Amino acid sequence: MEEKPPELGGVWKRVVVVGGGVAGSLIAKSLQFHADVTLIDPKEYFEIPWASLRSMVEPTFAERSIIYHKDYLTNGRLVVSKAINISNSQVLTAEGRHIIFDYLVIATGHNDSFPKTRSERLKEYQAEHEQIKSADSILIVGGGPTGVELAAEIAFDFRNKKVILVHEGSRLLELIGPKAADKTLEWLKSKNVEVKLRQSVDLNNCSEGSNTYVTSSGEIIKADCLFVCTGKPTGSAWLRDTVLKNSVDSFGKLKVDENLRVKGYKNIFAIGDITDVKEIKQGYLAQKHALIAAKNLKVLMSGGKENKMASYKPHSPKVIVSLGRQDAVAQFPLTTLIGLVPGLIKSKDLFVGKTRKQLGLDPRIVDH
Ligand SMILES: Cc1cc2nc3c(=O)[nH]c(=O)nc-3n(C[C@H](O)[C@H](O)[C@H](O)COP(=O)(O)OP(=O)(O)OC[C@H]3O[C@@H](n4cnc5c(N)ncnc54)[C@H](O)[C@@H]3O)c2cc1C
């Protein structure tokens, strides 16, 4: 069937997108005027993940970075629920709905336990902000990009707080090069963040309310508030009892071909962090996956030949970690930079306006 809108006598194919994160929101938005799109996500909103740490120090920042799915998905269907099973033609949701598809896109990136409603999520930021404001000392566990960005946000906005960052690795930001990590460590130290490397904190063994934490080397840390910034599990556990169980590798990633289809399937795509594409898992790459898969779906839905589909080529690392509101550390393929120059690229708006624009929304402000 030709890809014609229903009002011109065509029948749109049913595309079901599971996961309304960075990749899922963009592909759903991109296909909504070319197919009968259903987006399944446990939340009524899409949240721009890289804005979350700024939102903890400035809760109103989240007004633009937490976006109702209905604001960009104006011509699609939204099902606010978790997907719990898939057959060859249907997705089953936790609330018991069976949703039929012609094409399926899996975009369940990472598992999270965020609240269902936007207002609850905004309240969480307000509460975290109050916690930071009233604390004299703050312990952050995890020295990847999330822990580093949070330490930097707090150190920049609350200069009198004692911030302690504990990381079990031998250096910060292990996903990028040592040069970037060293520069980041210097920056944090210059803002009086105390960084403890090669140590972990046993979070199962700290008594509630005592504000006392013990590190793996026996050091005692007193802190009024704790933030755990260690990695989240890949959102693929639910796939292990589905028709896709043999397509999940030992790291919990879905095996995809160069067209971003799940290997062995003609009508199932996977995009974003859930895929086994050999590259750093990054949001801007998840967006690229979404655009390639949308293109390929349009080819297939309009009866085009498979060899007309676009191939996805893994990208070399390009990472920018913001350090407060002005500075950042960036690793590009040929160089590492720290300070105001990479900061100008990311740290003021954290790509929030850009991401909103990509979803067809006003980059500036929303009225709700
Ligand atoms: C704090 C933080 C900062 C980051 N900073 C950057 C940055 O500066 N630049 C950058 O490029 N990348 C950054 N990243 C990485 C980037 O956010 C991820 O690469 C990106 O979110 C991956 O997109 P995704 O769509 O694959 O998955 P996600 O964005 O994780 O979305 C997955 C979605 O699937 C949903 N889901 C999960 N399970 C189910 C289910 N069973 N049924 C239905 N829905 C389900 C989830 O609720 C979620 O909405 C950052 C990540 C974090 C957490």
Image (spheres, rainbow, N blue to C red):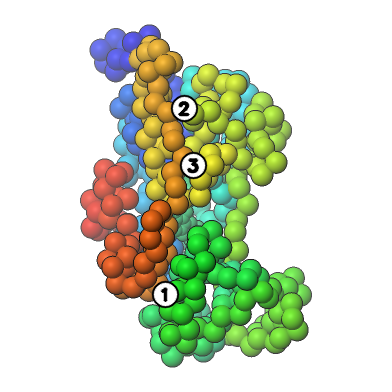
199 vs 360, left or right, is right
The residue pinned by badge 2 equals 259
Circle 3: residue type? Gly
Residue 262 coordinates in the image, percent (x, y):
56, 28
Q: Nearer the viewer, residue 358 or 318?
A: 318
Sequence-wise, the earlier of marks 3 and 2 is 2
| Some atom of ligand 1 lies within 8 Å of the CB belonging to the residue at label 1 | no
| Some atom of ligand 1 lies within 8 Å of the CB belonging to the residue at label 2 | no
Q: Nearer the viewer, residue 172 or 205?
A: 172
Say whether residue 282 is visible.
Answer: yes
Question: Of tags 1 and 2, which is closer to the observer?
Answer: 2
Disc 3 and disc 1 in contact, CB within 8 angstroms: no
The residue pinned by badge 1 equals 153
Q: Quadrant of the C terminus?
A: bottom left
Structural crowding at the residue carrying mark 3, measured as other residues with C-alpha within 10 Å and reported as few (<14), some (14–19) or many (≥20): many
Q: Nearer the viewer, residue 238 or 248?
A: 248
Question: Of tags 3 and 2, which is closer to the observer?
Answer: 2
